Amino acid sequence: MTPDRAHYVDLLSRLVRIGSINPAFSDGSTNEAELAAFVAREMEELGMETRRFEPEPGRVSVLGRLPGAGGGPSLMLYAHLDTVGIEGMDDPFSGEERDGRVYGRGAYDMKGGLAACLAAVRTLRDAGIRLRGDLLIAAVADEEVASIGMADLLRHATADAAIVTEPTEMRICLAHKGFVWVEVETFGRAAHGSRFGEGVDANMRMGRFLARLDGLEKELRASPPHPLVGPPSLHAAVLRGGTGASTYAAHCRLEIERRTIPGETEELVLAQIRAITDALAAEDSTFRAEVRALLTRGGFEARADAPVVRSVLGAAAEVLGSEPQMVGEPYWMDTALIADAGIDAVVIGARGAGAHETVEWADIDSHVQLTAILARAAADFCGRAE
Ligand SMILES: [Zn+2]
């Protein structure tokens, strides 16, 4: 079960050359649809049945299914199609191979993983291996912004387990953080700057809130850390209040990002913040505030005894020669959506650099290793038909 390195490099280069910037980061002229069509053709060439999902115009995801012989569990390999923007990049879609690397936007995050998913199916086919369970590949839109692609795909499809191939430097990721975006508004009363008896200053009231939020932030970071992802945290990300120097601010608005550890809920996050606004309101009847959640993405933690974790661990140890490190990642991935849909999930991806930066590249050797790991893990998890 040795992947074809030259074929892998050619495939990854072609994926990079099809720009698939998330429309949130482009002028809207490039998106995932063309790449999804290319990926669907590759899947069909590998004998996979394909389904296409388009929850919003032009936002296309594709699901490939290699039917198993029967009698084994199904496994979904996952990669996202979209990339961040290309500002400041010299030749973002070159797909050039140089010094054991493939360069270009998305090579590392995560067309390298997408190519490995496709190449793993080819590797199994070339080795003459037929699986008992179905092997799926989910190639989805919009991971970099709102995950509408995977959220939609999971309404139509499922599997017994999933391997997410976001780049983890050949480590097995068993947990990642979630986040909650929280809006806090304070309300005052507008008045001319000379009329201190009439004005109620919403910005000053937000100041009181921020001073206590700073205390909560320190408490969170001092709380017992999660063994894989560390402690929770928050930051006061966006602050806006007032209309002009000679006017008492009637309104001030703050957006907080609260990074959660697995198990922390939106309710818990809101309760901690409302405890502050409630205390301030009890101290001063002119303090008025509203707190609401804008977007919540839960954290992820794998079941350590899940069969897919054992399959990936065994395959990685065989391919790499030793057991890979088990880690947590601080950033959010679609893995949490997969786990929330009741699918056992684990993350393993390859090496590279420059995600969201101006020079991005994927390390070829580790991506070929990833391909071999995915093929072996699929054979182990789905079972081999005789
Ligand atoms: Zn990614």
Image (cartoon, grey):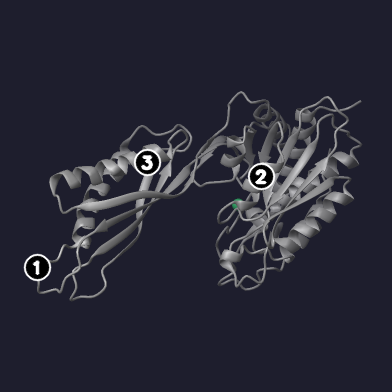
Residue 226 position in % (x across, y down): 43, 33
Residue 259 position in % (x across, y down): 42, 45
| Residue type pointed to by label 1 | Phe
Q: Residue at x 62, y 32 (%)?
A: 342
The answer to whether residue 2 of the structure is visible from this angle is no
Q: Give the residue pinned by disc 3.
A: 269
Quick one: label 3 or label 1, which is nearer the N terminus? 1
Quick one: label 1 or label 2, which is nearer the N terminus? 2
The picture quadrant where one finds residue 223 is: top left
Residue 286 position in % (x across, y down): 16, 54
Give 378 or 63, whichever is nearer the viewer. 63
Task: Give neighbour class at mark 1: few <14, some 14-19, many 20+ (Cα, 10 Å).
Answer: few
Task: Give neighbour class at mark 3: few <14, some 14-19, many 20+ (Cα, 10 Å).
Answer: some
Quarter of the image with the C terminus is top right
Mark 2 vs 3: CB contact within 8 A = no
**Residue 275 located left or right of residue 224:** left
Q: Residue at x 30, y 56 (%)?
A: 185
Q: Give the residue pinned by disc 1.
A: 196
| Residue type pointed to by label 2 | Thr
Q: Give the residue pinned by disc 2.
A: 165
Quick one: label 2 or label 3, which is nearer the N terminus? 2
The picture quadrant where one finds residue 191 is: bottom left
Per the image, label 2 sits on a secondary structure element best described as loop
Task: Point out the frontmost of discs 1 and 2.
Answer: 1
Task: Give neighbour class at mark 2: few <14, some 14-19, many 20+ (Cα, 10 Å).
Answer: many
Give 202 or 123, whichever is nearer the viewer. 202
Give 375 or 345, whichever is nearer the viewer. 345
